[in-house]
Image (spheres, rainbow, N blue to C red):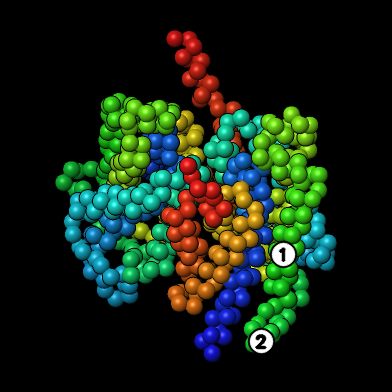
Amino acid sequence: MQMMVFMQFLLGGVVTGCFLILATIGFSLTRRVEGFLNINHAEMLGVGAFVTWTLNTMLDWHIVPSALVAIIVTAFGGLFIARTVYDPIRRLGPAVLLITSVGVAYVVGGLVDAVYGTGIFTLDIPLATTYRFFGLRITDYQMMVVALAALTSVSLAVFLNRTKMGLAVRAMAANPELAASRGIDVRKTSRITWLLSSGLAGLAGVMLAVIATLSTDIAFHQILKILAVAILAGLGSLYTVILSGLMIGIAMDISVFWIPAGYRPLIAFAVVILVLLFRPDGLAGKRTS
Amino acid sequence: MNIEQLTLAIATYGCLYAVMTLALNLQYARGGMINFGVVAYFAAGAYAYAIVTQEAPSGLDQYLVGLDWPWWAGVIAAALASMAFAVLTGWPTLRLRGEYLALTTFAFAEVFHSLLLNERRIGNGSVGMANVEQPDFSWIGLDERVAYAFAAFTLMLITMLVFRRILASPYGRAMDVIHDDEMAAQAIGKDIQRIRFEVFIISAVPVGVAGALFAMITTLVAPSLFTAEVTFFVWIALVLGGERTIIGVVAATLALVGFQELVRSIHFETVRTAQIAASVEHIMTGLIFIMILRWQPFERFRTRKEAAE
């Protein structure tokens, strides 16, 4: 019986991990290509979630078109912020960009707060149906999160390795000057990166709205976990995000088996601190010379 | 709220926050360390003060230790607690660089916050500890609030002078070298790791004392008072003031606290308008932040002055 409860927590951990992968992969993509930590990424999750909620409940749209529109809105919102705020200060270096993105997070978070105010928001969608496999329970929405995480990871890998545009993005990430001198359109590549990473934030936001109840401070809680996953993976690496997302998700949910649930975020960072003590550059890091 | 109260509040909290800004200034502008967890050292000081001075637990209290010692023992304990926390967090993290250091200090602060929130035996969990001991000011014949403003100002002044002295010394020069060129510093035989570690610990001490003073003034310590927002606030003040000027960061902190207190002192008819005002305050702070970083008016001002000389 104990074993069964444990397995249930493990399964919950996998679902949490898959959500974390969705939330972090766009963040890591920005770090890789644009070279800085975009703290505002989590607020874009909030934007995606609240646009979905508005279309779904205020305008009575079906969830699928609302989600699609929300993702597109978030993607272009992210691109707009990048062009107006980040591009002009690129020359000042990643530390200034990082601190600026905190300012941007304040503005975006404040806007969401001003429009929606306090309270709890739920989508107008059918209640989750629970399925049983070998005595373990999982809802259809949870399965959707897992499927989307897998689909996103695979299609991102295909995009980066097989398409011309994806190769251009990787070239930009590795050496921007060289990429530009070899005739890669830097502006276009950067545009694709921002659309992609913000769109992924939007998708994660939609998933958040589907599996959890929303409140305006939800975005801030996500940034902590996103940072944990991203540091653990090694900043800027994409494939290790999958591993580290699952690790942190599972560690967080399994910990509930032994210690009170209030400690879940603490567990995420405890894992990070432990790993960094042994590998200062994260899981993907090369040995420092 | 009348003008006098407002001025006192701005002076008191402004000076307390300025102590944190000064510490960050020393760590970042001189030591090159991005500390995104400064609130944790502040909280460590406040909690240490509360635990040392609080009476033994009774009734509904869930905390384990309350020593009921006088206030000055609490202040010393606050300085020591903040220092100990700096040793604990600095030792494993300071070999990390730039962004990794920023994120791990942030992580430590979150872990500490979550510990205070969940472990009721430290300080009653989310309820916090109320009726924190206040020193008796009646013998000086000053109004309590004036006395606290004065104490905060004195603490800030001492911090400023000590940091200034350190920076002017050969030790301060060594810090500048590390900031400008690590390789060169290493080549002339400076132990980079050690100096950074020492700077990290030294700068934590006044932050802890500021925490104790904060606990006295509010007479309450609770996890909700020590969130990451405090850290961001201090960082905004630091950026606003310009990295390398001590007077600049103090002025910026005072201006920012003043702005915040002014918005808070406005009386609102409904809860909803008050809430919108709070959001607008957030948006304004963020916008100021973005604009300062983008156009760097203080930097330009300084270079122009240098050119004129």
Residue furthest out toward the left? B139
Q: Position of residue B50 (x, y in %)?
A: 28, 59
Looking at the rendered structure, the secondary structure element under dot 2 is loop
* Total count of labels: 2
Q: Residue at horizontal 61%, vertical 76%?
A: A11
Q: Position of residue B92 (x, y in %)?
A: 38, 51
Q: Residue at horizontal 46%, vertical 74%?
A: A260
In front: B118, or A53? B118
Pointer 2 local density, CA inside 10 Å: few below 14, some 14–19, many at least 20 = few
* Mark number, residue B249: none
Pointer 1 local density, CA inside 10 Å: few below 14, some 14–19, many at least 20 = some
Tell me the chain of label 1.
A
Tell me the chain of label 2.
A
B87 to B29, vertically: above or below: below
- Give the quarter of the figure containing the N terminus of chain A: bottom right
Q: Residue at horizontal 54%, vertical 72%?
A: A253
Q: Is residue A49 visible?
A: no
Residue furthest out toward the top? B309
A255 to A75, vertically: above or below: below
| Residues at marks 2 and 1 touching, judged by CB atoms closer than 8 Å | no
Alpha carbons under labels 2 and 1: distance apart? 22 Å
**In which quadrant of the rendered view does residue A274 lie?**
bottom left
Q: Check disc 2 and report the residue beneath it.
A: A134
**In which quadrant of the rendered view does residue B271 lie?**
bottom right
B240 to A218, vertically: above or below: above
Q: Position of residue A202 (x, y in %)?
A: 72, 55
* Mark number, residue A150: 1
Q: Is residue A57 visible?
A: yes
Looking at the rendered structure, the secondary structure element under dot 1 is helix
In front: A205, or A15? A15
Q: Residue at horizontal 39%, vertical 63%?
A: B116
Kindly identify the amino acid type of the residue bearing the numbered disc 1: Ala
